[in-house]
Image (tube, helix red, strand yellow):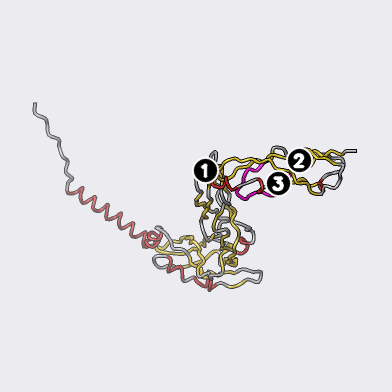
Amino acid sequence: MTATPKKVRILGKNTKVYLFFVILTSLFLVLTKLSKDYKRVVKFPVIVTDVPVDKVIKSQSIDTVTITLTQSGFSDLVNTFGVKPWLASFTKMKTQERGGYFYSFEQDADLVTDLLFGAVDEVSIFPETFTVSFDTLSRKRVPIILNLTTSYAPGYGATDTLDYKPRSVEIVGPQSLLDTIKNVQSKTIALENVAGKIDEKVALIPPLEGVVIGTDEIAVVQDIGKFTEISFELPITFKGFKSEKTKVFPNFVELLCLVPLDKYEGITSADFQVIVDFSKLEEGKEYLSIEIEEKPESATNVRLSTTKVKVLKID
């Protein structure tokens, strides 16, 4: 069976003429409307410019200025795609008796024609002025506080003092903010199970918005070595011991500590001294603390087998 072909409807001459006049009429109406003048309200962002290098904006009373104006529909259509900011120059500001500065929009009313496409008429501006307060841009140097915790792998420890550079940093910002800043903190970092040299970069935390710090990070270094435990039986040195009728027990104490493996052979009992100070004995008490008065710098985790002596008075 042969399929019947689909019929294609072709617009007649009269229909084409009708559509042409519809389009032409619509275009005429649009152009007529665009040629008319309309009252429009435009909000411009306000940006303060030409601020001296030694000043920084603390606050300003407005962020936008409202302009009411008359403009053709065509210009209005073009301007709907965005407006430029109103640039209020510091050089045109005047000082106020109570402090700060103020700017008059009227003195720069001609700017409206530069900021918008097309001619404008019947311009009114609200508000007529706005105020700006400035702070002095200053700088000072403050110490850096390192927030770092370290735990070492079994048998390992620090062989020197933890160091970081720089130890201080210059900060720049409004004087009123700088007066509140005493230091700059690092981010908190935890190093665990450390068994080798520490060589880390630690970021600094900007103290306040609007304050710039001279460096973003510090370098942290520390040498780590293998340690071994060592112990000595040491005689106790008594200070301020005057009464012959006083006996003390014990007279010796065991001292234990960790020392770097490469310095083990060079450390002896003569490098340590433990004391008991009788000037610290309180009336009616019979115990005094044993104090570690001398120890090698490389010795860590120094501890005593007993921490007190008993004082006996013999009649």
Q: Residue 251 carries which label?
A: 2
- Which sits in the foreground, 208 or 221? 221
Q: In which quarter of the image is the N terminus?
A: top left
Q: Earlier in the sequence, mark 2 or mark 3?
A: 2
- State the quadrant of the C terminus: top right
- Badge 1: few (under 14), some or many (20 or more) residues near its Cα, within 10 Å? some
**Camera-side mark, 2 or 3:** 2
Furthest residue in direction right, as rendered:
315
- The residue carrying mark 3 is 292
In the rendered view, does 130 fall on the left or right side of 81? right
Viewer-nearest of discs 1 and 2: 2
Element assignment for label 1: strand
To which residue does mark 1 refer? 194
Of the numbered discs 1 and 3, the one sitting upstream in the chain is 1
Q: Where is residue 110 in the image (x, y as percent from the top left)?
A: 46, 71
Residue drawn at (60%, 54%) of the image: 145
Q: Is mark 2 on a helix, strand or loop?
A: loop
Look at discs 1 and 3 and give the one toward the viewer: 3
Contact check, label 2 and label 3, Cβ < 8 Å: no
- Tell me which amino acid carries mark 3: Ile
Q: Give the range drawn in magenta.
A: 289-303
Q: Is residue 296 magenta?
A: yes
Q: Which of 191 and 173 is in front in this view?
A: 191
Q: Distance between the residues labelled 1 and 2?
A: 39 Å
In this view of the protein, can residue 131 be seen by the observer? no
Examine the image and state in which quarter residue 27 appears.
bottom left
Above or below 56: residue 203: above
Spot the residue most to the top.
1
Compare residues 80 and 5 and report the one nearer the observer. Answer: 80
Q: Where is residue 195 in the image (x, y as percent from the top left)?
A: 51, 43
Element type at marker 3?
strand
